[in-house]
Image: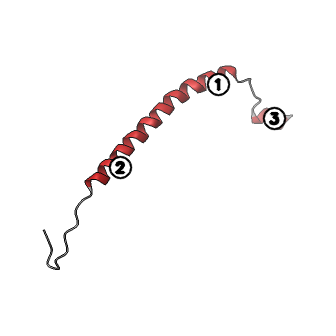
């Protein structure tokens, strides 16, 4: 299809849209994977980390 000036009408770039959708899915899956690992890592880190004084304790010293 052409408009009156002879220039073709703009077509949607479905490959670009599909690629963006795929990238979004990959990013979301990666964030989910990191969140799951982060929960496990954080629970392990809390067990190993020694207790640190709070800010109130530090200021009162």
| Residue at which label 1 appears | 45
Q: Residues within 10 Å of mark 1 (few under 14, many from 20)?
A: few
Cα gap from disc 1 to disc 3, whole angstroms: 23 Å
Asked which secondary structure carries label 1, the reply is: helix
Asked which secondary structure carries label 2, the reply is: helix
Q: What's the mark number on residue 20?
A: 2
Write the residue at 15% across / 74% down.
3
CB within 8 Å, label 3 to label 2: no
Q: Which of labels 1 and 3 is toward the front?
A: 1
Question: Which of the 4 image quadrants contains residue 12?
Answer: bottom left
- Mark 3 or mark 1, which is nearer the start of the sequence? 1
- Mark 2 or mark 3, which is nearer the start of the sequence? 2
Q: Which of labels 3 and 2 is toward the front?
A: 2
**Residue 37 image point, x, y percent:** 52, 27
Instruction: Tell me if residue 47 comes above or below residue 56 in the rendering.
Output: above
Query: In the picture provided, is 34 more to the left or to the right than 60?
Result: left
| Residue at which label 3 appears | 58
Query: In the picture provided, is 45 more to the left or to the right than 15?
Result: right
**Residue 55 image point, x, y percent:** 76, 36
- Mark 2 or mark 1, which is nearer the start of the sequence? 2
Q: Which of labels 1 and 2 is toward the front?
A: 2
Q: Nearer the viewer, residue 51 or 1?
A: 1
**Residue 14 image point, x, y percent:** 26, 53
Write the residue at 74% across / 23% down.
50
Cα gap from disc 3 to disc 2, whole angstroms: 49 Å
| Placement of the C terminus among the 4 image quadrants | top right
Question: Which of the 4 image quadrants contains residue 8?
Answer: bottom left
């Amino acid at each position: 299809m052409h408009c009156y000036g002879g220039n073709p009408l703009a077509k949607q770039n479905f490959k670009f849209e599909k690629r963006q959708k795929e990238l979004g899915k990959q990013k979301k899956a990666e964030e989910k994977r990191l969140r799951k690992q982060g929960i496990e890592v954080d629970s392990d880190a809390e067990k190993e980390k020694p207790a640190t004084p709070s800010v109130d304790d530090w200021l009162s010293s």
